[in-house]
Image (cartoon, rainbow, N blue to C red):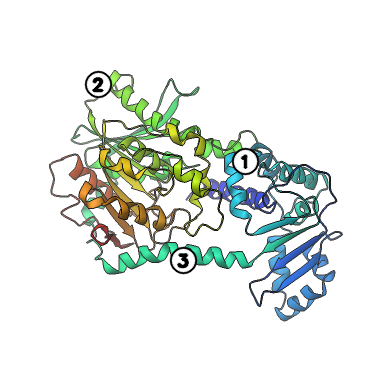
Amino acid sequence: MKQSWIQQRLLSMAAGVACCFGGMGLAPLPAEAVDRLQLRLPVMEMTITLDIAQVRTAAELIQANPDLQELDRAGEGAVLRLLNQLLTAPLPEQTGGVAEQMVGHPLLEQALVAASELVEVEGLPTDTSGRMVSDALAATYRDGQPTVLGLLQNMPGESITLNLQALAFYAQRLQNNWDDARQLVQQGTPAVPAPPSLLASAATGWTREQLSLSVAHRPQPISLTVVKPTGAANGRLVVISHGLWDEPASFEGWGRLLASQGYTVLLPRHPGSDSQQQKAMLLGDQPPPGPEELRLRPLDVQALLDGIEAGSLLPGTALNTRAVAVVGHSWGAVSALQLGGLGTTSRKLKDRCQDPRDPERNLSWILQCSWLTGAEQGSLADPRVTTVVAVSPPLMLLFDETSAPSAQAKALFVSGTSDWVVPPDPEAVTPLRRGQPMARGHRLVLVSGGDHFNLWAPADQADPPVLGPLILAWIHEQLGVSTTFTFSAGRWGSSARPLVDVTSGL
C-alpha cells in the first residue's frame, strides 16, 4: 500500500472518532459544557466517573480521579498510556473541516446511529445532524486543545458515558458474522494453486496508458487507466471498478494479468468517490460522497462502453462490446452487480438502518444506509455486461433478491473470512443462500484469512495478486474464450491464501 493511502485513511478514521464521540449528535440548545465522563467497563458492570472539567492532559485526568490512580498503579502505567492514545492524542487539523462538511449528511447520520450504543449524552435531546459536534470541534481548535478530551469538554450536556460494554457486543457480533463463512471454508477443499508460469506472465505482455473521456452525466471527464496486450489480443473487454475512496492503481495487478492473456482492460476513476475526493473531503473542501453516486458510478462504466462503440475511446481497436466483463471491489462490486442486472430497493434500508442492535449490522451498513434516497434509481442493468466478478460486495440491504432470476450476467462473488468492513456473512453468504446461486450459474468463493484490503492487486505489489488467476479463469469461461484455463477446470487457487468454492455448501 502507498504511504499516502495509509495517511489518508488514518485521517479519515480520526475524523470518524471525533464524530462518534459526539454520540448521536445534539440539538442546538443552550447548555453547560460536559464536566463528567463516565466509563462503563465490561468488568463486573463497573462504572467509573471522571471529572474532566479542568484537565488538559492524561496525567492530570488521573491525578484528579482516585479510581484511575489505583488502576494506573495496578497496571504499571497502562491506564496513562491508554488515555494518552484515546483522549489526548492530537486530532488532525482537517478534522474540523471534515465535520463541517458532513453536517446533515447521510453518512454522518449512519455513523452516529452506529455510535449511539457506545456513546450516551445526558442533558440534551438527540439529533443526527452532527451540527453540535461540528460546533464543539470548532471551539476545541479555538481553545488550542484539538484532542478528543478537548472535544468532550466543549460538548453541551451534563455528562457523557462511554459504554465500553458495547465493544464486547460489537466484537461478538463480528465474530458471529465470520463464523458461518469459516465453517463453510473448513468443510470445503481449497483450489489447487495456479501455475507459476501464468503468474509470471503478468510481468510482461502488456502496455498501459492514461486517457480521459468527457461524459454527459458529470461536469468533469472520466480519467482511466487502459492496460492492453502486446501480444495476440482476443478482442474481449474487461472493466475494473474501484471501491470507496480508492483508485485504479489498487487493482492494476488484475488488469496486467488479464492483459497478458489477451484482454483489453479499462480501470476508470470514479470522481465522486475516489481517493482524490477523499483528500478534498479531509481538507474540508468537499462533503462525503452522496447517494447520487449509486447511480453515477454505473453510468461511468456505461459511458466507457458507449465511447468505444462510438469510436471516441480507443479508436481503431476491435473490441467486442456485446459481451463485457465487469470486475469490482466493495462499492465497485455494487456497481458491477447493478450493471449485471440486480435491482436495487429501499425496502430493507428503511426497515433496518435505524437499529444499532440489529444482529446482522456491520460496518458496511454505514455506507449502504447512506444510499437510501438513491436506492430506487439504482437499477441500471446493461445488456452488454454478461459476466461480473464482485469482490467484498455489500449485498444485504441494497439489492432486491427477487430481481436475481432476471439478471442477465453470471456473477462470481468473492469474500474474505476475516473481512471486518464487509463481513462475508451476512453480506455474501446469506443473500446467496437465499438466492440458490448454483441454479442460476452464480458462484461464491471464500478466501481464508482474506480481509477487505489484502485481496487487492496494487500496480507496484511484488507478490502475485491472490485473486488474479481466479478472476481470469472465471472470465475465460463466461466469455467463451478458447483455453483450458477455466473456472470449471480449477487450478485458479493461491499458495498465499486458500480459496474455496463454497457454493454447493450453501
Q: Amino acid at mark 1?
A: Leu
- Quadrant where the C terminus sits is bottom left
Q: Is residue 205 visible?
A: no
Residue 484 locus on image (x, y percent): 13, 49
Cα–Cα gap, marks 2 and 1: 41 Å
Residue 223 spot, x, y in % from top left:
43, 29
Q: Nearer the viewer, residue 218 or 352?
A: 352
- Measure the alpha-carbon separation of dots 3 and 1: 31 Å
Q: Secondary structure at mark 3?
A: helix
Disc 2 packing (10 Å; few <14; some 14–19; many ≥20): few
Which mark is first along the chain, 2 or 3?
3
In the foreground, 464 or 452: 452
User: Is residue 211 rendered to the left or right of residue 278?
Assistant: left
Circle on res. 202: none
Residue highlighted by disc 1: 282
Q: Amino acid at mark 3?
A: Gln
C-alpha separation, residue under disc 3 versus residue under disc 2: 52 Å
Closer-to-camera residue (506/485)? 506
The residue sitting at the bottom extreme is 74
Q: Quadrant of residue 497?
A: bottom left
Instruction: Determine the secondary structure under disc 1.
Output: helix
Residue 316's disc is 2
Q: For the point 20% across and 51% down, which residue is it? A: 487
- Residue 180 visible somewhere in the drawing: yes
